[in-house]
Image (spheres, rainbow, N blue to C red):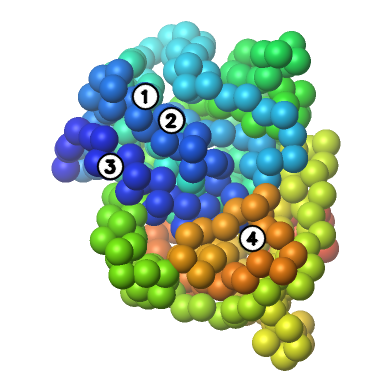
Amino acid sequence: MRRILTASDVEAAVKGGAVFAAGGGGWADHGRMLGTAAVNAGTPELVSMDEVPDDAWIATAAAIGAPAGTTQWQMLGVDYVKAVELLQQELGEPVYGLIIGQNGKSSTLNAWLPSAILGTRVIDAVGDIRAHPTGDMGSLGLANSPEPTIQTAVGGNRANDSYIELVIRGATAKVSPVLRKASDMSGGFIASCRNPVRASYVREHAALGGISMALELGARIIAAEPKGGRAVIDAICDSLKGSIVASGPVASKAVAYTQEAFDIGTVTVGQGGGACTLHVMNEYMAVDGAGGERLATYPDVITTLDDDGVPVSVGEVREGMRLHVLHVPRHVIPLSSSVRDPSVYPVVEKALGIDIASHVLGVKA
């Protein structure tokens, strides 16, 4: 399957990606900027893995940082393009196409502008269907690999003299924290291109069809919007085989930005026996019920929706606003090898102080 992405796809990508953003995943306006710039600059092409030669180089286009709006970040479309150019220069060979590390309000569109300008294809595969806090979680199972790989980062707040260009080689687990530190130094959000691998590896380890899934969900949301918020929420639940596990006002929000470029804390929705606590590390990583029982755990899709069915990011959450907590179980979505990699969970568990790995893998990481 090949098709040219057009202006009509931009809003679908943003709205579908926003559900998979799981409380993070960038900014809707940033996504619209990336998509609009791409379709006006050229012809970004979406290509399924069936069309890609096994020996083609595929890299991951990503944005790194904490998107909750607590820092003075600046990231331009040209930063995504420059990150790809730097990786190609270091690799010494052209990159055939780009996957994304995760879906999100803007991250679903991370590969579009390089495709339009450089001719790299937008590969219909993702490192993770939903958004996640660490690069390792979208690294296609490379997090624990000793093999050196290439990672680049570009961007930063120009007015604050925080613009950075970075090229680094090394094992993923060692160099990913360096890019996260660069993100913090740049203002909290930075474009990257990383982990070039052959298409045969992507075919085996990625979540295939992840871009199409976001586009199809976004189209259903747009079709339901004239019927009102309840219809939008029903369309999302029907499309993803999900359910609303809690509804009510935000009773409390305790989320803080760290120097590792993470937003960490909790959000409590509802009251009394119907209340639930969402554990935040940039994105919603788990939901506990009023009695402490686990209702949902990454890589389940966990998203907060307002009464209009619009996904509300962690940075937009305010105490007193009414929200609906969407849960999509992991068994109904394609999963990548990263989800089954025990090495990606300890850093998240330590930051949040909760167990995640045993809920995913059946054993503690």
Q: Is disc 2 surrounded by few (<14), some (14 to 19) or many (20+) residues within 10 Å?
A: some
- Residue 287 in percent (x, y) is at 66, 72
Compute the Cα span from label 1 to label 2. 6 Å
Disc 1 element: helix
- At a point 69% along the width and 79% down the height, the residue shown is 270
Compute the Cα span from label 1 to label 4. 30 Å
Residue underneath mark 2:
33
Which quarter of the rendered picture does the C terminus lie within?
bottom right
Residue underneath mark 1:
37
Q: Does residue 56 show up?
A: no
Q: Is disc 4 surrounded by few (<14), some (14 to 19) or many (20+) residues within 10 Å?
A: many
Q: Which mark is residue 336?
A: none
Type of amino acid at the residue the image marks with label 4:
Tyr
Is 43 left, or right, of 117 in this rendering? left
Disc 3 element: helix
- At a point 45% along the width and 37% down the height, the residue shown is 31
First along the sequence among labels 2 and 3: 3
Compute the Cα span from label 2 to label 4. 25 Å
Of residues 329 and 359, the one drawn nearer to the viewer in this rendering: 329
Q: Which residue is most to the bottom?
A: 273
First along the sequence among labels 1 and 3: 3
Is 350 left, or right, of 242 in this rendering? right
Residue underneath mark 3:
9
Compute the Cα span from label 2 to label 3. 13 Å
* Contact between labelled residues 4 and 1, with CB atoms less than 8 Å apart: no
Q: Which mark is residue 284?
A: 4
- Residue 145 in percent (x, y) is at 60, 38
Type of amino acid at the residue the image marks with label 2:
Met
